[in-house]
Amino acid sequence: MAQAFSELPLHARVIWAKSGDPVGHGLLAHMLDVAAVAEALLEHEPPSTIEYYANLFGLSETTFIRFVAALAGLHDFGKAIPGFQAKWLQGQQEDEGAGLSFGPASLRVSDHACASAALLWNHLSVVGAEPSWVLGVLQAISAHHGYNFHRQEINAAIPPFEGAEWSQARKALFDSYWQMLAPAGVSNADELPLAAVEWLAGLTSVADWIGSNPDWFPLGERADSLAEHFGQARRLATQALQEIGWSDYHALLPEESSTDALICRIVNRPGLAARPLQAEGDRLLVEAQGPTLLLVEAPMGEGKTELAFLAHLRLQAANQHRGLYVALPTQATGNALFDRALTFLNAFGDQRRLDIQLVHGGAMLDERVQRLRGIHDQKDDSVGSAAWFSQRRRPLLSPYGVGTVDQALFATLNVKHHFVRLWGLANRVVVLDEVHAYDTYTSGLIESLLRWLKALGSSVVLMSATLPEQRRNALLQAWGVPVGEVPELPYPRLLLADSRGLRGATFDSRALPPISLRAIGEDIADLATCARQQLDAGGYGALIVNTVNRAQELYRKLESLQDEGVQLILFHARFPADERGERERQVLEVFGNTGTESLRPGRALLIATQVAEQSLDIDFDFLITDLAPVDLVLQRAGRLHRHRRVRPEVHAEARLFVAGLHPQELPELKDTAWEFVYEPYILGRTWALLSREQTLQLPHDIDRLVQAVYGDAPLPEDLQAEALAYIEGEAYGMHRARLNTERQQSLNIALTPEDEPQYAYLQKPRGNEEGEGLGLTNRTRLGDDAVTLVPVYWVAGGWSVQPGGEAFDPQQSLPDALARQLYGRQLKLSRKAVVAHFAAVGAPPAFAEHPLLRHLKPLELQGDSCIVGKLSLRLDERQGLVYESAELATLPED
């Protein structure tokens, strides 16, 4: 066994891993580099990670790091095959000069990752590892290009008819590599659980990404001695991690502190006392042992988010969790919470560099993120946002993150490098907010995510104001809590499950002023009239509707209010991303918590869709809403008189106007398009039960109404016979069919940590994440297909980002600054005709050749419109993207 590169047989030494001048990078050198990175990464992990996975791997903690790092470095062993070595002509010539043959039949196998799993079996088997344990390791390290291989694929990955010199060269490489690292110990595990396999797959991929960067690891043998090369690789790995911004584990709460003191620091408001929810939650948390699930059901505005940050402090201190990820339903809600997370981390950073990522598709457009990246080298700042973590599939590797739930759910699907996401979420505190806000399919994926998080040693905080009992029980069961053990507790309530079992508590919450419930018609004219009447008396109100088309139509009807001094804001998802972000900031500025209790000046009206109903800390004097499922109506109602402030006299009483709530007649669900947004059965039960209410008393009525609508409470006896027949007949039948279908869809696609590793992927199709191009798409949410477009304007000389702006040639490559500007204008559309049209349209080189734009399509505007079949897509600066009839759009003006 060679101890130096010069002692290797020549036919082993010339085998290359990376092409490049002058002679590329040898396979043995690259394997040692990646092992060095893996070892450095593991040394940055908290002790609890090492203890937890050493136990799963059947290794002692003293031998675990070096042993697992050595396994990770073997990931590219399969490059020592003719089919791969023939991919670089110069490298092949060097191989042939050293006596390696390249027969035509031996070139049939070229997938080096799969070949690693096939060829390493004999080598690892002879170092004393149990065969079943080796299978899991080979599955893990061979997945570093994105997907786990099936056993049949691995069996077919041994090159046929290769010369005997190839196996001799591989034996020399393996023996020298293994002897140099000399990993002590052997696993005594019978078989690795799937969670350990995917954790190792994630570690291997990340180590390979870093170790393959020639800026950090220059090509070539850096010393003749293998030990010296590895020692230099360790120093280079440490430098690379420092440059990335990969910090050592650091607990945010080094010493005991009272609940009140911690809450004051979390919100940066000295002298603040913890609310009952936070005090009772902390009482449960300080007694928690091991990975923990905390379920929080509490009204809007009671401080659930602050309790989640407090839970991270307590659970990290108890379990040495490596970080925190807060997952929210939408980009808008993630953006809104990001500032609160920054306040939290700045308060507990203790002059150490903490990295945080905004984790969703529009993160790079956020000015706060850009600012955090710009201060990377300022040592006096506690919080930064390293650019390396921001790249696709990497954000969850950062210790702290705020983003969408979808980014976490991709960890449960067979998408490329899903296990990197799992590795990032391992041994973390993961907060899932608004867990009531998802359909059956996405809820099924969330349950799968809970099972994965428990298997990975993480803790979880689940939060909702309006959680149906069935959903609560399903979430608890996913964590392993039997339904029969769930105690009956009045709302609001807390449930905590840890290694000692399940405990619960209830607490007092502040009673909000009564909300007067008023019914109005569902026609646009009725909503517009109501809004005008309320604004006549002053105040700041909101009009929340269920579709973008209704929001745009209302805006057109009420646009003249601006001439009367009303500040009118339209907010929905059909604006280009940069404009949507600006409107989101405007909404928070106008309707958010200003910290003052004075009367707001003037009058203002927000016209919005569902993007305004969750996790945004906004407050209205009056609110008008379309009928929606009862939990969402209550969420919207929670924005009424939310903040302590002086109200206009006419709005001293909180009033909620609900379109379609007249008790005499079931509202029109088809013409309003409500039945395409929400389930008619739930809408019908909401209408039937809520229309009998005169006043809402929050929080008392929240649980009563949610459980009645989503449970089996009888409908009112005086209900119109025709409406009753529809709700309990046709609508219920569609509801049950949809539940069963979506449930089965989630079971079919979600990966399950309890499965045996070699069989876990057999029926789980490999797919892309949404927006990654052609082929099968594995989704986190059901719904119509969508296409992401970038509006561009025809001008003299090509296209422009803005009307009349500077031209660029779509046939030429773009500078990064312009590509980022275009990326920031993206717009997602789901209308079937539009999706079908753009799916058949190719992208020009300006888009196809840039990594930011390659999965996007240009929306080419003549003036402000683009004709797609019978549709005209008009981008209006006030209304966003408007669908119109193409015939009307092309008629000459009078």
Image (cartoon, rainbow, N blue to C red):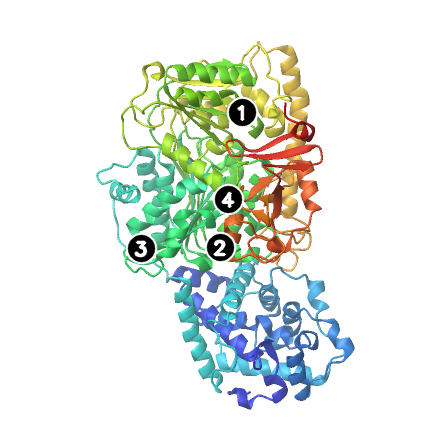
Quadrant of the rendered image containing residue 310: top left
Measure how far apart labels 3 and 1 are at the Cα level. Answer: 43 Å
Q: Which residue is mark 2?
A: 817
Measure how far apart labels 3 and 4 are at the Cα level. Answer: 26 Å
Q: For numbered disc 4, what is the local secondary structure?
A: helix
Q: Nearer the viewer, residue 58 or 211?
A: 211
The reply to whether dot 2 and dot 4 touch (C-beta < 8 Å) is no
Compared to residue 224, the image places residue 496 above or below, namely above
Compared to residue 432, the image places residue 730 above or below, namely above
Q: Of circles 3 and 4, which is in front?
A: 3
Q: Which residue is mark 1?
A: 628
Q: Earlier in the sequence, mark 2 or mark 1?
A: 1
Q: Of circles 3 and 1, which is in front?
A: 3
Check disc 3 and give the amino acid type.
Ser
Quadrant of the rendered image containing residue 596: top left
**Residue at x 40%, y 64% (from the top left corner):** 44
Check disc 2 and give the amino acid type.
Ala
Q: Give the image location of residue 547, x and y in percent.
A: 56, 28
Q: Which residue is mark 3?
A: 382
Give the left or right position of residue 281, taking residue 37 as reference: left
Check disc 1 and give the amino acid type.
Ala
Q: For numbered disc 2, what is the local secondary structure?
A: helix
Q: Give the image location of residue 728, x and y in percent.
A: 64, 20
